Structure formats: structure tokens, C-alpha cells
Amino acid sequence: MAEIKHHLTDQLLMGYAAGTLPEAFSLVVATHVSLCDECRSRLGEFEAVGGEVMMSAGAVSMSNDSFAATMALIANTPEAPQKRYAKGIFPAPLQDYVGGDKDDVRWRPVGGGVRQMILASDGGATVRLLHIPGGVAVPDHGHRGLELTLVLQGAFKDESDRFGVGDVEVANEDLNHTPIAEEGEACICLAATDAPLKFNSFLPRIAQRFVRI
Amino acid sequence: MTEQKTPARAEWLDEIYAVRDTQDQAAFARLFAHFAPRVKGFLMRSGASADVAEECAQEVMATIWRKAALFDPARASVATWIFTIARNRQIDMIRRARRPEPEDLPWGPDAEPDQEEVLVLQEETNKLGEAIAALPEKQRELIQKAYFGDLSHSEIAEQTGLPLGTIKSRIRLALDRLRHTMR
Ligand SMILES: [Zn+2]
């Protein structure tokens, strides 16, 4: 795989380690970490901080029958969990949401040749797969919150840089950008937003509601 | 810190191995006595009621038993590992949300992990704990609040000013070493 140049921020990794991110962002983090050893290692650091915080939080006595109850729980669910990793271009956490790999995505057109599949929407944050044909621009859009875009196939460019497979763009509301898929293979990316995308010139607001973009 | 004579972290490894290899209930009971009350305390600090925290802590301990074979001491201390399990159960059981997890690495845990690598990681994690304990109170509180899930928006902004970089660099060195040797 090409070298990953654009990584997750410390704040996102810490939020994921602490378990405080919305599900939509957690999926992007888990998918990027599956592809990126550097962020896996950084996440390990933040989880180590969490472990130390937990150990110093103060112990609270367990109830009297607690150990026996736990042994009963163990006896009732004997199967051991297996390691999980996926074959294909989508890492395991993403495949869990799609129900398979690239060929299993249930795409829906959103106009301009762009297709999407909404994967989860929770607490105001939404995560979707986007399929952008080579050379096609995702219409100019601003966003009112945080937007994460992780490339899984192909590449896109915007005003700030080029993003290839494994790269994640972390954009805040200041960035009003126009990602363009590179010529050639379609660009597939996983995008999470914590506010609806507002397209500046693409769809009237009423239509946005129907296509949920 | 009122606690004395906590066994060195590497000793908890023996208990994990005993559970993994021989389903040793006595070793599990020692893990339980040490970790379950801390998991429960953590969950309560994060907002769970005593009953829910008790139930969740039992689930966490049961998961430790079942997943003992997947624990990789070259990548995480026992406390770190248990924290990740507790956090996942918390999201699942208490917040009733789905928790996407990174996929597992195809390599490891090794049947015979390099003892020195394991000890370096444990030692770095212990140092990390000491470094957190030695932080000025306000900064330590900020870190704790981040993990208990009760940071305000302005505090989240402030978080970028944390001296986490200096702490991280210690443990990062160890993890970088691990990562390179494990390729
Ligand atoms: Zn990365």
C-alpha cells in the first residue's frame, strides 16, 4: 500500500480511546486505524492513558456474590472470540456496516454521477460511503461542523492537498472545499459529518432532505 | 494514592496466562479482586449507577476470561487492555451504541513474546501512570474528565494545551520500537 500521509488528529484518537466520539466518527477512526500502523500505535498511547486513569479512579467494592455471578456468565457463553480481519479493500469494521466488501455496497445516486450509501446516523453525526467517478468533483460544499473523509480506493484532490488510499482529511467548518476525484479509477471514500453537508450550488435544501446528504 | 505493594504489572501477566492456558480460577480470582472494583469505580465516575456498573464490571471480567488468548503483552499492559474492554462494554451496555473496533493485526500475539519487549512496554506504561499522577492537579483533572466523558466544549479546546506530548513521547518511543520489531 502507498504510504499514508494524512493521519487522524490527537483529539480524535483521544476521543476514540475515551469512547466519547459519536458512532459515525468512531467508524472512520476504526477504519483508518485498521489501515495505519502509525495511528494504531498512537491510539495505543491514548488507551494506555485511559488504563492509568481507570486504575487511579478509585475502587468501588463489588457485591458479595459478584465472583460467582461472573463465573456463571463465563459458563453460559463458552465460545472464545476469534481474531477478525477482512480480505478486500474495506477493513473489517467497515465491512461490518456494509455487510461485505466493495461489491456489496448498495449505492444510491445523489446526482452528478456521485453515489452514496448511508451507513449510520447517530446523535447528529452521519457516516456514508461516497463513490465519485474519476475526474468528477463532489459539488462545492461547506459544512457546519467536523468532516472526516477517508479514501479507500482511488484518490481525490482539493484546495489543500492530494488524498490517496488510507489518507484521512480532517476538515472543520472553515474549509470550504471542492474535492475532485483523480482521473481513472473511481474514488471511494468513507465520510463522516456532524452536521448535514450544505451544498452551495448543487441541491436546493428541500432536496437535500430527501437524499439525506 | 493509598495503595501499597501492588504487584508489578508483569505479575498480572502470569495470571492472564494461567487463565488462558489452564482456566485457572484462583488466578482469575486474583485478577478479579484487583481489577473488578477499579472497573466498577471507573464506570461509576463515568456516570453509571452502582447496579449498572456492577453488572457491566462482571461482563468485563467475563470478557477477560474469554479473550485471554487474544491479549498481546507486547502491545498493551494488562490495565490498558482491561480499560479497552471496559470502555467497549460501557458504550455497548450503558450507552447502547454500536462500537466500531479496528481489525486485529494478522500477526501476534506470539506464543512466546519477547520478554524484554514486554517488560519495556509494562515499564513505560507504569512511567506513564506516574507522569499523569505528577501532573499539576488542573491538568490531571482535565485528562480524567476527558476519559470520564465529561469535558465541556471549552475544556476540549483547552485540551490541546495539555503537556500530553511530553508524556506521550516516553511511551511512543517504546511503541515505535515495538512496531518496528514486529514488522
Ligand atoms: Zn494514520
Image (cartoon, rainbow, N blue to C red):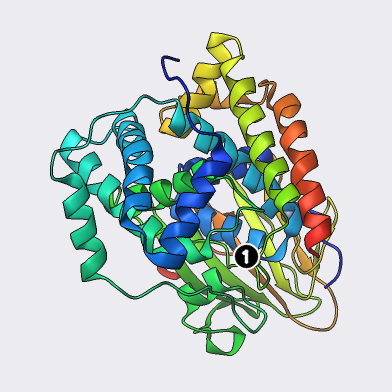
Classify residue B131 by image quadrant. Answer: top right
Q: Closer to the camera, A177 or A20? A: A20
- Residue closest to the eye, B108 or A163: B108
> Can residue A90 be seen in the rendering of this structure?
yes
A62 left or right of B129? left
Residue corresponding to mark 1: B109
Identify the residue shown where x is 57% and y is 84%: A101
Seen in the picture, residue A159 relative to A17 is either above or below; the reply is below
Judge the density around disc 1: few (<14), some (14-19), many (≥20) Cα neighbours within 10 Å.
some
**Kind of residue at badge 1:** Pro
**Can residue A14 be seen at all in this image of the molecule?**
no
- Left or right position of A132 against A209: right
The quadrant of the rendering that contains the N terminus of chain B is top left
Q: Position of residue B181 (x, y in %)?
A: 82, 58
The quarter of the rendering in which ligand 1 is drawn is bottom right
Across and down, in percent, residue A34 comes to 64, 64
